[in-house]
Image: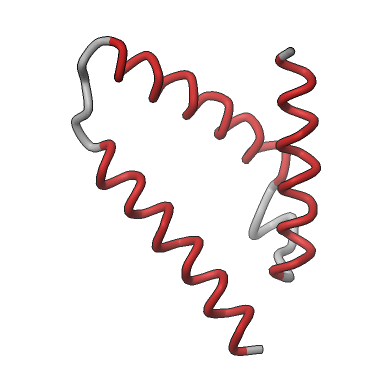
Amino acid sequence: MNNEWRSVLREAFVRAAAEYGLTEDDFPVEALVAMTMTFAQGYALERLEGIDEGHIALLDWIERWLESLEERRSAS
C-alpha cells in the first residue's frame, strides 16, 4: 500500500510541476513525496494524541503557497 500511495503522489507532483513550470530545484518530487508521507503520518499521530499546536498555521502556510503558485501561473 505504501508504494502504491507513493506512486500516486509522485505522478501528481510530476504533473503539478509541469503545470506550474517548476524545476526539480524548485520542486524536488522525491523529497516532496517523502515529506508528504511523513507529514500525513505525523499529522494523524498528533491528532490521535490530541495535539493540534501549529497545525492551523501549517495548513494556512501550505494554502498560501499553493495560491501563490496559482497566481504566478495566471500571471504568465
Query: For residue 36, which quarter of the picture?
Result: top right
**Image x and y of residue 33, in percent:** 66, 35
Relative to residue 48, is residue 75 depicted above or below? below
The way the protein has been coloured in the rendering is secondary structure
Query: For residue 23, which quarter of the picture?
Result: bottom right
Q: Decide if residue 34 is on the left or right side of residue 66.
A: right
Q: Quadrant of the N terminus?
A: top right
Q: Residue at x 36, y 46 (%)?
A: 59
Relative to residue 39, is residue 76 depicted above or below? below
**Image x and y of residue 9, in percent:** 71, 37
Q: Residue at x 80, y 43 (%)?
A: 11
Q: Residue at x 23, y 37 (%)?
A: 54
Query: For residue 47, which quarter of the picture?
Result: top left
Q: Quadrant of the C terminus?
A: bottom right
Query: Which residue lies most toward the bottom here?
Result: 75
Q: Decide if residue 30 is on the left or right side of residue 36.
A: right
Q: Residue at x 19, y 31 (%)?
A: 53
